[in-house]
């Protein structure tokens, strides 16, 4: 059988290669067995789940097949009647009292991929121990037969729900949507052909929004729907040409955010995280821990020290942040890749909610995004970030990281290493910055990250990292 392994955020594979109906059924059956095992601890022993899917090839068919498997196993299913964002499924999991949520999505991965994310009953990513329990069920056998979809619907085991509309109401309730509409702020939006298309336009109105890449195109013109700077040149030009005050971009399932200021300059997730900490603490009077992943900016540590907020680092992956939110008092939790959650919303990344919160911040402060970022740099910087992804084989990326673990250099690119951290991957600190290497959990990619006091310095550290890998 094809090996199936859950990565940083779910199981992902290339469609028609590893991602087949047969393998999807294996994962769905394992999930059904896991759901029965946890539901037996509840009052009635009958588990339930909500299922959504993004805009990728065969997403609707894959989701229907998972629903058929779960319902045939005696699990009550609510199935989204159109493509939806991952945070909407997370919200519905808790709101409607389900044991789990499932999203058929490969998030930011290239369009040839699809995937399977599991959400826990609290409305956020399943904990690592939940995923391990599902993986332990993968190679076990069961005997239940699959029933026709129509029969399962007729029996009430599968119910269709309009989750897109339900979640739009959540956003209207939790954000000052009317205030943003009245402010006259003009928003450029690039959903990257993903599940976030149309939502911001529906909320703010066509007079306030210019949206691109919002047609249903599973091929996504061959571009990974990842809202990082190199993928957002079109949005950058759009913001300037259309006179937008801000640009928002979302990944394939809209749980990640990328932003442009009014000059078409990329505002990375590190600065978005810092802006949210400042806004929620200073303007809204909220407190709590700031939780960041290992590859995220030191600016948050500086802010925590200045504002009296505890800061905690986790391994990369929102599944490590979610437990902190559920079990503790977290003000902002986020990661370098654009996945961010804030107090008062779901314990889940939500690109649309975060993007609109920053727009709300611009309205409330009466400042442009560039001015808000300048405030941050003046108070807690200067800090600049760089990243490069090296596409390689799984064996090569693991061999390089093993080499670093066994023989760590005293200097990189001529700069002396002052300390080394290995919470997730390897981070080398220097007198004026840091350089980090980490293997992607979802692709054959080695990621190289750096932060320093100037953009040139950060870029230079990344190049030194590339040279070390290729040397």
Image (cartoon, rainbow, N blue to C red):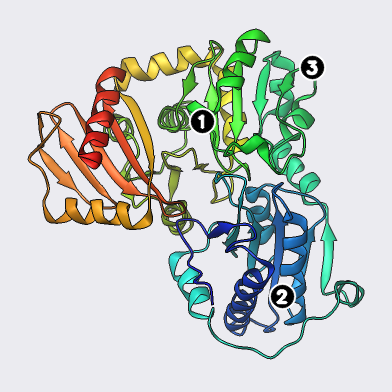
Marks 2 and 1, how far apart in space?
Answer: 43 Å
Select label 3 or label 2 by which is in front.
2
* Element assignment for label 3: loop
Residue at the spot of label 3: 207
Q: Earlier in the sequence, mark 2 or mark 1?
A: 2
Residue at position x 84%, y 61% from top?
160
| Labels 3 and 1 touching (C-beta < 8 A) | no
* Element assignment for label 2: helix
* Quarter placement of the C terminus: top left
User: Which label belongs to residue 70?
Assistant: 2
| Labels 2 and 1 touching (C-beta < 8 A) | no
Marks 3 and 2, how far apart in space?
Answer: 43 Å
Residue at the spot of label 1: 284
| Labels 3 and 2 touching (C-beta < 8 A) | no
- Is any atom of residue 176 visible in this view? yes
Q: Earlier in the sequence, mark 3 or mark 1?
A: 3
Q: Along the horizontal axis of the image, is 206 left or right of 251?
A: right
């Amino acid at each position: 059988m094809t090996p199936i392994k859950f990565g940083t955020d779910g199981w992902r594979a290339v469609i028609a290669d590893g991602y087949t109906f047969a393998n999807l059924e294996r994962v769905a059956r394992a999930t059904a067995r896991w759901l029965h095992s946890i539901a037996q601890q509840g009052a009635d022993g009958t588990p339930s789940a909500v299922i959504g899917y993004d805009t990728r090839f065969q997403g609707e068919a894959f989701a229907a097949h998972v629903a058929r498997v779960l319902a045939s196993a005696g699990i009550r299913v609510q199935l989204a009647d159109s493509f939806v964002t991952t945070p909407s499924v997370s919200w519905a999991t808790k709101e409607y009292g389900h044991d789990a949520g499932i999203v058929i999505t490969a998030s930011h991965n290239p369009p040839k991929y699809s995937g399977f994310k599991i959400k826990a009953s609290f409305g956020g990513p399943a904990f690592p121990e939940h995923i391990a329990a599902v993986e332990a069920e993968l190679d076990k056998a069961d005997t239940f037969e699959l029933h026709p979809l129509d029969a399962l619907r007729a029996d009430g085991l599968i119910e269709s729900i309009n989750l897109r509309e339900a979640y739009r109401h959540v956003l209207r309730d939790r954000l000052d949507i009317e205030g943003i509409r009245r402010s006259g702020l003009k928003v450029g939006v690039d959903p990257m052909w993903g599940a976030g298309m149309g939502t911001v336009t529906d909320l703010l109105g066509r007079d306030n929004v210019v949206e691109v890449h919002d047609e249903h195109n599973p091929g996504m013109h061959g571009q990974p729907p990842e809202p990082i700077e190199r993928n957002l040149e079109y949005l950058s030009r759009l913001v300037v040409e259309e006179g937008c005050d801000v640009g928002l971009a979302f990944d394939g399932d809209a749980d990640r955010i990328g932003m442009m200021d009014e000059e078409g300059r990329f505002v990375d997730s590190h600065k978005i995280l810092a802006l949210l900490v400042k806004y929620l603490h200073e303007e809204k009077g909220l407190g709590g821990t700031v939780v960041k992943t290992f590859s995220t900016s030191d600016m948050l540590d500086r802010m925590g020290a200045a504002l009296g907020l505890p800061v905690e680092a986790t391994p990369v992956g929102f599944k490590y942040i979610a437990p902190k939110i559920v079990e503790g008092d977290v003000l902002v939790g986020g990661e370098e890749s654009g996945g961010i959650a804030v107090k008062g919303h779901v314990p889940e990344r939500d690109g649309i909610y975060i993007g609109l919160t920053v727009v709300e911040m611009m309205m409330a402060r009466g400042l442009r995004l560039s001015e808000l970022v300048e405030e941050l740099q003046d108070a807690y910087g200067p800090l600049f970030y760089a990243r490069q992804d090296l596409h390689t084989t799984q064996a090569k990326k693991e061999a390089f990281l093993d080499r670093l673990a066994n023989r760590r250099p005293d200097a990189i690119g001529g700069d002396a290493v002052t300390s080394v951290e290995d919470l997730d991957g390897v981070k080398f600190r220097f007198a004026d910055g840091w350089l980090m290497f980490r293997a992607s959990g979802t692709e054959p990619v080695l990621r190289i990250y750096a932060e320093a006091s100037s953009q040139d310095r950060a870029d230079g550290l990344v190049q030194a990292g590339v040279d070390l890998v290729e040397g």
